[in-house]
Structure formats: C-alpha cells, structure tokens
Image (cartoon, grey):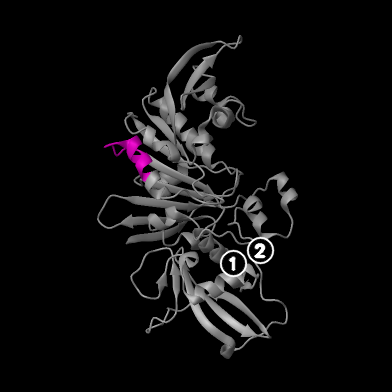
Amino acid sequence: MALFESKKRKKKTDYHYHVEPLLIMHPDAIYYVIIGKRSNGKTFSIIELMLKEFITSKETNKGAIIRRYDDDLKPSNFESLLEMFTDNDELGNYIEKLSKGKYNDYIYRSRRFYLCFTNDNNEVERTSEVFLYCFALTGVEHKKSTSYPNVTNILFDEMLAMGYYLIDEWTLFTNTLSTIVRKDSKAKIFLCGNTINKFDCPYATEMGLTHFTKMKPGTIDVYHYGNTALKVVVEMCDNPVKKYDSDVYFAFDNPSLKMITEGEWTINIHPHLPIGTEFIYKDILYTFYIRFAGEVVEGNIISANNDLFVFYHPKTTPINDFKGSRIIYQRESDTAINVREKMTKDPSNVSTILLQLLKLNKWFYSDNEVGELVASYMRFCGVEIN
C-alpha cells in the first residue's frame, strides 16, 4: 500500500505554473503528477525544463512526450507544439534566448523535434540533435525495437480524458515508458492533466493515489511505496491571485465552468429530488452501494408518493452487511457473492430495475459531486448519463 503525506505550496502571484519549485522540494521523486486549470502553463513549464537541460547538456539530455492517440502526433495536429517557444507574447523567441542565438526555430520530422537556425531567407542553416521524441499510446507496438538514449524527462500530456480511456490504458502507458527508458533509471516522468473528472482516472487507481479525489488547490501529496525508491509527487495547482481578463466570458452560474476560471474539478449539474418529494425509512425497498475511485455512494430504491425512483447520497460510515444481501458495484474484481463489476452486465433483478429507472430519468442525487461519481462509474459500465 502507498503511504502519503500532504503539504501546501506557497501561494502563486502570477498566471503561470512553474515546475521548478516542485523539483527543488522533491528532487528524488520519479513521478510528478500535476493537475490544474486549463492553459495555466503546465505543459510549457515542463518543455521549458527539457529545453534548458538539452541546451546546458550540450544536446545530450533529451525529452519525450506521450499523447493518447496516434492522430495526435500527425504534423497537422502536433507540429505547432513548440510555437509557444518561438513566438511568445511575453518571452519573444525563447529558443533563441535559451540557446544564445544558436537556434531560433524548430523542425518536426518523423515524430521527432529538432532545434534549428533559420536565416532571413527561410533557409535552415543548422540543425540540432533530436530534442524531443514523440509517442502515442495507441502506437507503442511499432516503437519497441527502437532505442531512445539519454531521455531524462518524459511528459504524458493530457493524462485525464474528458470521455473514455483506452482499453487497458495503464498497461499501454507502462509499456510506452518501458520502450523509452529500457534499463535506465535517470528519467523523471511528468503526468499533466486538466481538472476534468477526478473520479474517472485509471492512473490514480493504478498508482494507489488514495487521496487524489480529496486534494485541494495549492496542496502537494507525496506517496512512498514500501522499502522501494519509488516516490510519486502529486500537485493540485493553486489558483493564481491574478485572474485572466477572459474569465468574464465564463462567469455564468454553472459549476462546470469553474474548471476554466478557477481550476476546480469539472462538476456537471445532476438531477436532485423534485421539490416536495419526501420519503421515510420504510419507503426504501432496497439499498445498494457503488464503490468507485476510493469513494462509496449509497443508493436507495424508493417507493413513495406513488412513484418509484433511486436516490444516491454519500456513504460516510462503513458498509455493515454481514449477510451479503446488498449489492456492491465496483470496478475491482471480487469473489464476494454480493459484489458486481458492471451494472450493465449483471443479470440480477436489482440491476435490471436500476437500469429501467435510469432510462425513465428516475435517478436523483443528494448533490452534484455524488452525481459525478455515479456518472463516472456508469461511464466505466459503458453508459453515458447526464
């Protein structure tokens, strides 16, 4: 089991994220998981780190970037990745500044980035060694026989998905890492994501990040794994004191927009009990549970007011079901007789009734966060609910 400690980071005063303080605080970590609002500078900061190391090491230390899909790496989609370093409103041509004029541009070719110097006639006069290797989880099988020496920093960009993850994505990710690092152990691995959905993250589950869903902005959790040297640092980026002028476009009273303006987790609006709906304990026909992403939600099938519906609310006490008569739905396999993996694959009468009530829009939630957790579990089951 992973053991963790939680810390707070000094309050930010500018718009942009900077990874250097995290590296100074935890230089011995292997994985750095960084979660924050969209366009706050996470990707820029880590590629900047790669650039600095590449130049100061005389082009020895290289970087690698991982995306989810092969199509992400097509030139039409990906060659603009480094534009933020050649045409930056605040920094100008940052590649030129960092290399002290040796390079001022870049080339993207065969899924590799090179730095180069382009003269006034748009002619490339000199080109660097490979600066950045590019990989896709869906294309890792084609890369296994190739060597990638001296990679010191690896970035998995957009690790959190808005919709569905790949089948066995964690296995694809670790296989990709294995392809890059081989037998070496000098690479640091950065996983960056926007605050999209905290309950639907296979990486948090597979890495044992037990406190992931409870993190607040400005906090850092550190995980240790037994007597091994493995150390994982998870940072929930703080919200900057300064605000973007563009935040005014997203000032509607809608919780899902706080991901853009404040860096909070995306929480959609889910149906609550209709006004005037009341029930008492004897109206509960059956109780079941959903255990997902380290959280437990209790569900009640209720018959009240001449209506049949399901009400979900947090389960704050341990599940005491010694007879095993109450179904527990969860992602993890279990031999217990009352545990089910996917509601949609379960032939029991309970699951049949639940899915029928879902189709009739008879699922209600105590709050939007409970609704988001249930929606994440149902997405795992292959059903998208609003």
- Amino acid type shown at disc 2: Ile
Q: Looking at the rendering, in which quadrant would you find the C terminus? A: bottom right
Q: Residue furthest bottom?
A: 282
Depicted 42 relative to depicted 73: above or below: below
Q: Looking at the rendering, in which quadrant would you find the N terminus? A: bottom left
Q: Which of marks 1 and 2 is nearer the N terminus?
A: 2
Name the residue at 62% across, 77% down. Answer: 309
Q: Mark 1 points at which residue?
A: 371
Q: Quadrant location of residue 312?
A: bottom right
Asked if the residues shown at circle 1 and circle 2 are in contact, with their CB atoms under 8 angstroms apart, the answer is yes
Does any portion of residue 7 appear in the rendered image?
yes
Disc number at residue 269? 2
Q: In the picture provided, is 284 more to the left or to the right than 187?
A: right
**Range covered by the magenta-colored residues:** 174-187
Does the segment drawn in magenta span residue 175? yes
Does any portion of residue 315 appear in the rendered image?
no
Depicted 204 relative to depicted 79: above or below: below
Q: Residues within 10 Å of mark 1 (few under 14, many from 20)?
A: many
Name the residue at 47% across, 74% down. Answer: 348
- Amino acid type shown at disc 1: Gly
Q: How crowded is mark 2: few (under 14 residues within 10 Å), some or many (20 or more)?
A: some
Depicted 384 relative to depicted 93: above or below: below
The picture places residue 115, in percent across and down from the top left corner, at 48, 21
The picture places residue 140, in percent across and down from the top left corner, at 39, 37
Does the segment drawn in magenta span residue 116? no
Q: In the picture provided, is 58 more to the left or to the right than 312?
A: left
Q: Quadrant location of residue 175?
A: top left
